[in-house]
Image: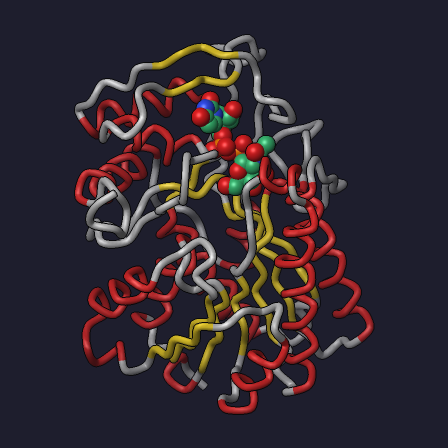
Amino acid sequence: MGSQEKTVLVTGGAGFIGTHTVVQLLNDGFRVSIIDNFDNSVPEAVDRVRELVGPELSERLEFHLADLRNKQDLEDLFSQTSFDAVIHFAGLKAVGESVANPRRYFDNNLIGTINLYEVMAKYNCKKMVFSSSATVYGQPEKIPCVEDFQLMAMNPYGRTKLFLEEIARDIQKAEPEWRIILLRYFNPVGAHESGRLGEDPKGIPNNLIPYIQQVAVGRLPELNVYGHDYPTRDGTAIRDYIHVMDLADGHIAALKKLFATEDIGCTAYNLGTGCGTSVLEMVAAFEKASGKEIPIKLCPRRPGDATEVYASTEKAEKELGWKAKYGVEEMCRDQWNWGSNNPWGYLSEP
Ligand code: UD1
């Protein structure tokens, strides 16, 4: 059976990584149903997905306003449509907020996902691609991070990802017919090359690139650089930034792997580039791409931050046949194309 006959449920499909993945799924021939509660996304993002893929492919996309915490919403959906697989993005991801309000994280991320597994099992849909995160490596003792490293959580958000990985492994062990792929994202950045889709965080961004972008468009005065005394080449922390279109393609590769591999079990893959970039290198790359100067202020380290994190990409390359295509230059180019054309994100005005 080719992609044409396959229907995929995408939870959180209106979000940053979700929208980019849905575009690629539709372009690849899949039918897609999105479920999203717009907690951290907007209907305009789904309209733009439709606009990008065109009217014909748009007919293969359904949207459902629903919340995973409400099991009845899921029952309604699964009783109407037979899904071949689920890509599960929906979840909260702000580390600071998770420390302040852990119950909100447990409720959304844990309860939501447990409900999803229950309903999937009931309707015999047992193929899942789950959004995990490099956060499960905690403060890695060695780099690059390899999938079989010991896992660790540093905060409630990270704990939800870690628990959900463990839950996936337990379910698959008890019911071997499940096929589950856990994708550990490193630092997703960039945007669709059209400049029509991108990340649109509510409030002041927590993550580096959205913050830099808002400085570049004049929404914020300067970037706080958290830590300049790390034992790295320029004293700032190093991360593995990955273009969101590469991530999207990683999901298609994972999905195809699930369909093709009866004995995949529950398997984790890193989605990263394998290259580390420091905060100051990222600032310089963004300045070059945008032609804007990004004023910086050197600040103390942010609690809980690791010095250097980047992925081993071997397993995904070998088993998924997937490898990131884009480098930091393209990430900043596409980020700026999105940011300069949509300085207030999906809203036209503040
Ligand atoms: C963060 C989360 C991680 C989560 C990921 C989601 C923490 C400790 N980790 O990763 O669990 O999965 O986001 O996308 O929050 N930086 C600045 N100034 C800023 C913002 C960031 O200097 O205004 C620095 C940080 O100190 C860090 C680097 O930029 O060294 C990247 O930060 P960020 O984009 O927040 O990503 P992570 O911390 O890697």
Residue nearer the viewer, 177 or 75: 75
Quarter of the rendering containing residue 297: top left
x 30%, y 32%: residue: 213
Using the rendered view, name the quadrant where residue 145 is placed. Answer: top right
- Rendering colour mode: secondary structure
In the rendered image, residue 87, in percent from the top left (x then y), is placed at 52, 67
Is 193 placed left or right of 128 in the picture?
left
Q: Is residue 311 visible?
A: no
Q: Is residue 125 above or below residue 52?
A: below
Residue at position x 29%, y 34% from top? 332
Query: Is 217 situated above or below 348?
Result: above
Tell me if residue 263 comes above or below residue 125 in the rendering: above
Q: Which residue is painted at 70% across and 77% down in the image?
A: 118
| Residue 189 image point, x, y percent | 39, 41
Left or right of 165 in this view: 270: left
Quick check: 35 left or right of 349? right
The answer to whether 48 appears left or right of 236 in the picture is left
> What residue do we see at 66% from left, 68% from top?
264
* Nearest to the observer: residue 93 or residue 10: 93
Query: Which residue is farthest front?
Result: 350
Q: How many numbered tags mark residues here?
A: 0
Q: Work out which quarter of the rendered image holds the N terminus and state it.
A: bottom left
Name the residue at the right extreme: 174
Name, please, the residue furthest toward the bottom: 80
x, y percentage for residue 17? 42, 54
> What quarter of the picture does the C terminus occupy?
top left
Q: Is residue 229 visible?
A: yes
